[in-house]
Amino acid sequence: MTTIIDGKAVAASITGAIKDANAELQAQTGRKTGLAVIIVGDDPASHTYVGAKSRMAKECGFFSVQHTLPKETTQQQLAGLVHRLNGDDAIHGILVQLPLPQHLDADAVIQSIRPEKDVDGLHVANAGKLATGDLESGLISCTPAGATVFVRRVHGGDLSGLNALVIGRSNLFGKPMAQLLLNANATVTIAHSRTSGLAAVCRNADIVIAAVGRPEMVKANWLKPGATVIDVGINRVPAPEKGEDRTRLVGDVDFAECAPIASVITPVPGGVGPMTIAMLMANSVIAAHRASGLKVSGQLSKLISG
Ligand code: GUN
């Protein structure tokens, strides 16, 4: 029997612990966790994601601020806002939603965020800590951290002897995901658009993590029977069966074909997606505790890092 991971339920258990941790912080210091989310322009998908992040921050009891800037915003204006938030003691986490409009230099903006407030884990200081095996003092990119919670629930914290394949090499996901798996002793392969013979590489993997942005690319005959399959893709495709101009969300894995072959699989939607937001909230409450020289509760630590 294949296990289908219920990402919503796992995320809900984590956000429950985050609410408690935030309430404890407030009782101890008089301060709530403060999260600022910046969005530039009017990409509808980005607005949907950011709205969900701001709503969840409120639900967790945080001080949640959303800065919605017009698409004509200049680099200096954006830099000025980040600079102000860097110096604001009520703000512990800053997230700049990506992608930014083309005229803006996203990397310059990300690298100008104070590493202690970089709840996306994209600053070179945080990426470097992860790359050198320091999983304690930095902040880890939210989606790979969420996918790792699933992997740990299935395989435990020690992946010795297991082959893991990450399809995708972005700074936001593929690279940090590979580092997390490597840190847990997996034998890790990173595949990408220039990889040849991907199906054969995939058939060798005990754990497959797909993050390429290609609808239903991973097929049943790519899988080793009994593999753990984590689908990070979120692709909107036409759904004529639902009516004219209707769409539906699918992952990078052909779920219907792959579910019977896998031993564990995540659905889209309702798999990794809810975990990204939960881990963003976790990073924010962790950053807020650190700002007061405190550590988050054992319960939350156990849920997110085993
Ligand atoms: N755009 C898509 N996913 C993400 C994310 O995790 N963080 C940011 N900042 N932008 C994104």
Image (cartoon, helix red, strand yellow):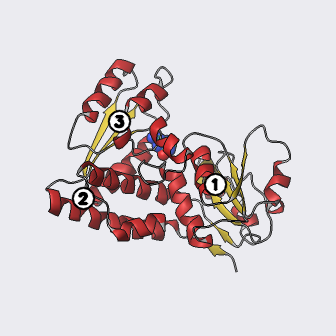
Q: Residue at x 15, y 56 (%)?
A: 29
Which residue has dot 3 on it? 114
Q: Secondary structure at mark 2?
A: loop
- Whether ligand 1 has any atom under 8 Å from the Cβ at mark 1 is answered as no
Which comes sooner in the sequence, label 3 or label 1?
3
Assign the N terminus to one quadrant of the image. bottom right
Specify the amino acid type for callout 3. Answer: Arg
**x, y percent for residue 292:** 23, 51
Residue 41 visible in the shown view: no
Q: CA distance from mark 3 to mark 1?
A: 27 Å
Q: CA distance from mark 2 to mark 3?
A: 23 Å
**x, y percent for residue 295:** 31, 59
Residue 301 visible in the shown view: yes
**x, y percent for residue 11:** 44, 65
Q: Secondary structure at mark 1?
A: helix
Q: Seen from this angle, which residue lies furthest left?
A: 30
Which residue has dot 1 on it? 182
Which residue has dot 2 on it? 61
Which comes sooner in the sequence, label 2 or label 3?
2
Q: Residues within 10 Å of mark 1 (few under 14, many from 20)?
A: some
